[in-house]
Image (cartoon, rainbow, N blue to C red):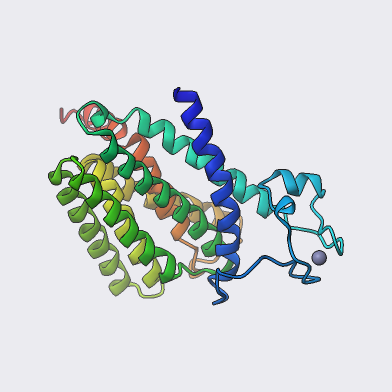
């Protein structure tokens, strides 16, 4: 049963990943999502059997069926990454500590919120790395959708105090990043601030410790990566490094392992 659910949600992730490829390509360009897919080189319509996640790319050997133009490997990779991310979210969700005391309908709303969060994270990482932007259309939608789904979960029987903590997490991380941006406007973008609010919401829902660990982890990863780049002389101290990916990765470390890491740290530090 568990394996079946994880596999099913993983396959759903592959399909969503296929959609995220379209989002990552069209949203920064300001194009509509409601248009059939065409080959960017020869304008040939992409048929459904050419649009099966990962398999079509393998079957077509990474080339357009009409004109033979290469299809970048990032397409199947993003599909695969989303599939894996969804399967991992399902696995984490099945082992949530509150599973026993919350009605299953409420838990499904929570699952939907974290899947939305995962999909948004994947597409934001891709866009930030490609064009150094975190479009408001995606961060704002994620905040609204995840907020609505978590509120729905409470209406269906989850604890309202959890939602309050999530709201405080969102406001807290928003304020923190807003302050960083006020101090160093060239270091953070407005997109980073909005993304931090989404991460604060999802981390706060899980607990205070995951919120702290998730927020801290972003700077650990971003800092280590930045120093590594400087050592390889790829980046000067003034080169802006896309920080969005680290906010997302840090948040997921907080979601999955925040409680364990935080408690472990406190034990080592001799606080508890
Ligand atoms: Zn073509």
* Quadrant of the frame with the N terminus: top left
User: Which one is nearer the viewer's eye here, 230 or 175?
Assistant: 175
Question: Is 208 rendered above or below residue 44?
Answer: above
Q: Is residue 10 left or right of residue 97?
A: right
Q: Is residue 24 left or right of residue 43?
A: left
Q: Position of residue 120 (x, y in %)?
A: 45, 56
Q: Position of residue 74 (x, y in %)?
A: 67, 54
Q: Residue at x 31, y 62 (%)?
A: 144
Asked whether residue 229 appears in the rendered view, the answer is yes
Quarter of image, res 156: top left
Q: Position of residue 124 (x, y in %)?
A: 48, 60
Question: Is 205 rendered above or below residue 121?
Answer: above
Q: Residue at x 51, y 57 (%)?
A: 123
Q: Residue at x 77, y 71 (%)?
A: 43
User: Which one is nearer the viewer's eye here, 218 or 233?
Assistant: 218
Question: Is 60 rendered above or below residue 253?
Answer: below
Q: Going by the picture, which residue comes out furthest to the top?
A: 1
User: Which one is nearer the viewer's eye here, 131 or 82?
Assistant: 82
Count of numbered marks: 0
Q: Going by the picture, which residue comes out furthest to the right?
A: 67
Q: Is residue 171 left or right of residue 126?
A: left
Question: Is 56 rendered above or below residue 94?
Answer: below
Report the image quarter containing ligand 1.
Answer: bottom right
Asked whether residue 200 appears in the rendered view, the answer is no
Q: Going by the picture, which residue comes out furthest to the left?
A: 161
* Quadrant of the frame with the C terminus: top left
Q: Residue at x 67, y 49 (%)?
A: 76
User: Which one is nearer the viewer's eye here, 139 or 188?
Assistant: 139
Q: Position of residue 266 (x, y in %)?
A: 22, 32
């Amino acid at each position: 049963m568990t394996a079946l659910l994880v596999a099913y949600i993983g396959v759903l992730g592959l399909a969503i990943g296929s959609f995220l490829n379209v989002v990552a390509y069209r949203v920064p360009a300001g194009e509509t999502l409601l248009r059939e897919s065409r080959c960017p080189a020869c304008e040939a319509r992409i048929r459904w059997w050419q649009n099966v996640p990962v398999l079509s790319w393998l079957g077509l050997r990474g080339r357009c069926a009409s004109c033979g133009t290469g299809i970048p490997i990032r397409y199947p990779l993003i599909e695969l990454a989303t599939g894996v991310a969804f399967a991992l979210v399902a696995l984490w969700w099945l082992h949530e500590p509150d599973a026993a005391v919350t009605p299953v309908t409420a838990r499904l709303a929570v699952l939907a919120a974290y899947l939305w969060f995962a999909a948004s994270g994947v597409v934001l990482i891709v866009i930030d790395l490609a064009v150094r932007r975190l479009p408001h259309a995606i961060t704002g939608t994620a905040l609204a959708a995840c907020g609505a789904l978590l509120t729905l979960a409470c209406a269906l029987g989850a604890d309202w105090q959890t939602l309050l903590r999530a709201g405080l997490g969102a406001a807290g991380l928003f304020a923190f990043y807003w302050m960083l941006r006020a101090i160093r406007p060239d270091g953070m973008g407005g997109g980073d601030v909005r993304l931090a609010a989404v991460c604060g919401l999802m981390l706060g829902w899980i607990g205070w410790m995951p919120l702290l660990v998730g927020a801290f982890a972003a700077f650990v990863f971003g800092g280590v990566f930045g120093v590594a780049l400087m050592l390889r002389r790829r980046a000067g101290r003034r080169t802006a490094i896309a920080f969005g990916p680290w906010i997302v990765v840090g948040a997921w470390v907080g979601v999955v392992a925040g409680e364990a890491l935080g408690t472990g740290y406190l034990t080592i530090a001799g606080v508890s």
